[in-house]
Amino acid sequence: MNSVLAVVLLITLLIVLISWARVPPFVAFIATALTAALWFGMPLKDIGKSLGRGVGDMLAGLAAIICLGAMFGRIIADSGAARSIAKALIGAVGVRLILIAMALTGLIVGIPLFYSVGFVVLVPLIFSLGASTRLPAVQLGIPLLCGLSIAHGFLPPHPSPIA
């Protein structure tokens, strides 16, 4: 029971640091991890190695995915494909329904791609549509991210739920 209480208090600390104290999330996670290590009696000499190993293991899997996604996104932007897709979307649904089209685009692109790759690949489309429609990038990006999130979390043939 003591360990469960400690975990609940540590999660509360993390939430308070981020929401109330306005500590940047990365710093809040590190501070909470250090507090947890000390609370559970980890030797001081092992804390640095444990943090490095944990962060390194987490980033190792994402590095290749994000790099490939960035390369594909750059190719889409440089080739003019993002402008062509933006014009086709506006031509198909008009500016009035562009947010629904963005959500559907995110859903369709999210089926074969992981979330992070889909996001990096579609960022040029957001900026192209923003320039064409004069809508803020955040307003265009949120429906796109909603579609990606639905595909990432709920569709059975997607690689993430299967894994």
Image (tube, helix red, strand yellow):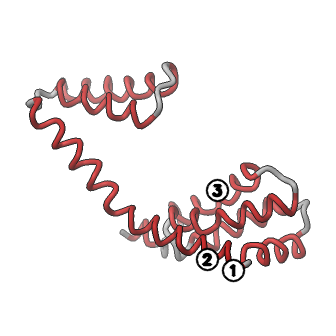
Residue 35: x %, y % from top left: 25, 25
Which residue carries the number 3 mark? 146
At a point 51% along the width and 20% down the height, the residue shown is: 20
**Disc 3 packing (10 Å; few <14; some 14–19; many ≥20):** some
State the separation of the CA atoms marked 2 and 1. 6 Å
State the separation of the CA atoms marked 2 and 3. 24 Å
Contact, CB < 8 Å: mark 1 with mark 3?
A: no
Residue 16 is left or right of residue 141, and the answer is left
Residue 103 is left or right of residue 129, and the answer is left
Residue 61: x %, y % from top left: 34, 63
Give the vertical position of 7 relative to 138 (above or below). above
Contact, CB < 8 Å: mark 2 with mark 1?
A: yes
Q: Could you say which quadrant of the image residue 102 lies in?
A: bottom right
- The label shown at residue 79 is 1
Count of number-bearing discs:
3
Give the vertical position of 59 relative to 92 (above or below). above
Location of the N terminus (image quadrant): top left
Give the vertical position of 33 relative to 64 (above or below). above
Residue 78: x %, y % from top left: 67, 75
Task: Tell me the SS state at disc 2.
Answer: helix
Which residue carries the number 2 mark? 75
**Disc 1 packing (10 Å; few <14; some 14–19; many ≥20):** few
